[in-house]
Image (cartoon, helix red, strand yellow):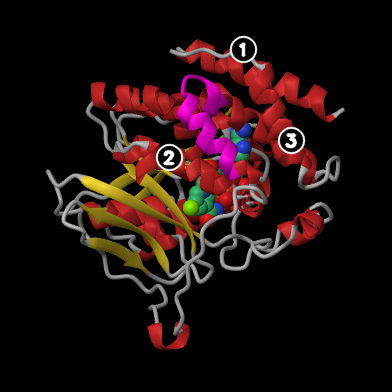
Amino acid sequence: MKKKQIAILGSTGSIGTQALQVIEEQADRYEVYAITANNRVELLIEQARKFQPEVVVIANEAKYEQLRDALADLPIKVYTGAQALCEVVQAEPIDIVLTAMVGFAGLPPTMSAIRARKAIALANKETLVVAGELINELAQQYNVPILPVDSEHSAIFQCLTGEIGNPIEKILLTASGGPFRSCTMEELAHVTKAQALKHPNWAMGAKITIDSASMMNKGFEVIEAKWLFGVRPDQIEVLVHPQSVIHSAVQFEDGAVKAQLGVPDMRLPIQYAFSYPDRLKASFDRLDLFQIRDLTFERPDLERFRCLALAFESLNRGGNMPCIVNAANEVVNRAFLEDQIPFLKMAEVIEQAMGKVSFIQKPTYEDYLATDAETRRVAAELIK
Ligand code: NAD
Ligand code: MG
């Protein structure tokens, strides 16, 4: 069997490193063709020496020489810059591109990979939040599958296998509720970065961990679900489920509800995106329901977790509004991580940005670039 060639955008991150573990365990099926990172050049060098890809890219040009010199003894092509990401994903032998980089920066290389007819294993949810309609049109035009890696969307995708032609009545999108699930408004006003970075169930990159604490992550996942599964916003119900055992569920028109359960381990959804429609034997921990015992559910509180409400609102407004929310969120997320603003200020700035940035009902790709840039300026100004 010919091994599937995989390109990983963001190989040094939380998703990227777990993807490499999957490839290592399934070495008879998958091979690393390209790995890329932004800053963590030492880890990237280590990964390159171990997996011997054809191509390595470091987006940050200041780190290029260090990377090139460290790999000089190997027959590996080394490139740098954001444009190089768009080029390497088009290499002929690549079968699957895993988009595991953070933020709006994932949009251009994802579009480039679709144009080269690569299957997309999509972790970078911001791409769909910003430009879901555009990505869907492009994927349809080039006949390319978008395979979800986000655990909730993988769960929904798994529930939908064997259901072709059976409409979804409702999606039950589960959320852990994050570290501040039971905090009062007064407490939320004073929570710290260190507390926000301690997610109860998942170990993830810093940006998504903060988004989980504010529940903007769940808001983004609602938008992601709309574009992946073609449902209306009112067909998506968010359930706070602190145990993170039910990764999400689908309700069909006969009332049947199918769910996917498991331990919180991103390697399973990553592997399923690679192997779909097959399931591969894997060494991941097994779920022990006797040990878990209780599965509980609460409605999300849209007042305490204003970001979730703003994401729903942006989806209902449509156009470039989700792009505005995403860009403003990238700015406030970083500002909170750098101790520049308190926790609740994040939603405040996003909401103000939604009212200030020019609204476009039918944005083009160029409009998204312009909206992203304008929103970053506006949000930075609002933080000052
Ligand atoms: P991370 O911060 O751990 O890793 C990000 C990776 O992307 C790193 O390799 C980094 O070098 C690279 N990168 C960042 N900015 C870049 C840029 N501008 N140009 C090029 N490369 C860049 O992040 P993560 O937690 O692995 O998340 C990656 C994506 O997957 C995010 O979109 C996130 O929302 C999504 N996701 C993550 C998880 C998770 O469990 N970590 C779960 C679901 C979805
Ligand atoms: Mg998720």
Label 3, label 1: how many angstroms apart (C-alpha)? 18 Å
* 12 versus 351 height, above or below: below
Q: Which residue is mark 1?
A: 358
Name the residue rendered at 17%, 53% in the picture. 1
Q: Which mark is residue 348?
A: 3
- Please, what secondary structure does the residue beneath circle 1 have? loop
Residue 379 seen:
yes
Name the residue rendered at 52%, 48% in the picture. 218
Mark whose residue sits in front, 2 or 3: 3
Q: Are marks 2 and 3 in contact (CB under 8 Å)?
A: no
Residue 48 seen:
no
Q: Which residue is mark 2?
A: 224
Where is residue 63 shown, x and y percent of the image?
70, 35
First in residue order: circle 2 vs circle 3: 2
Name the residue rendered at 34%, 50% in the picture. 171
Q: Which residue type carries mark 2?
A: Glu
Please tell me whether the stretch drawn in magenta is mainly helix, strand or loop: helix
Label 2, label 1: how many angstroms apart (C-alpha)? 23 Å
As for residue 313 lying within the magenta part, the answer is yes
Label 2, label 3: how many angstroms apart (C-alpha)? 23 Å
Whereabouts is ligand 1, in terms of quadrant?
A: top right
As for residue 17 lying within the magenta part, the answer is no
Report how many numbered discs are placed on residues in the image.
Answer: 3
The residue lying toward the viewer, choosing from 303 and 272, is 303
Where is residue 303 shown, x and y percent of the image?
65, 48
Instruction: Tell me if 142 is positioned left or right of 12 in this view.
Output: left
Q: Which residue type carries mark 3?
A: Glu
Quadrant location of the C terminus in the rendered image: top right
Q: Which residues are magenta?
A: 308-323
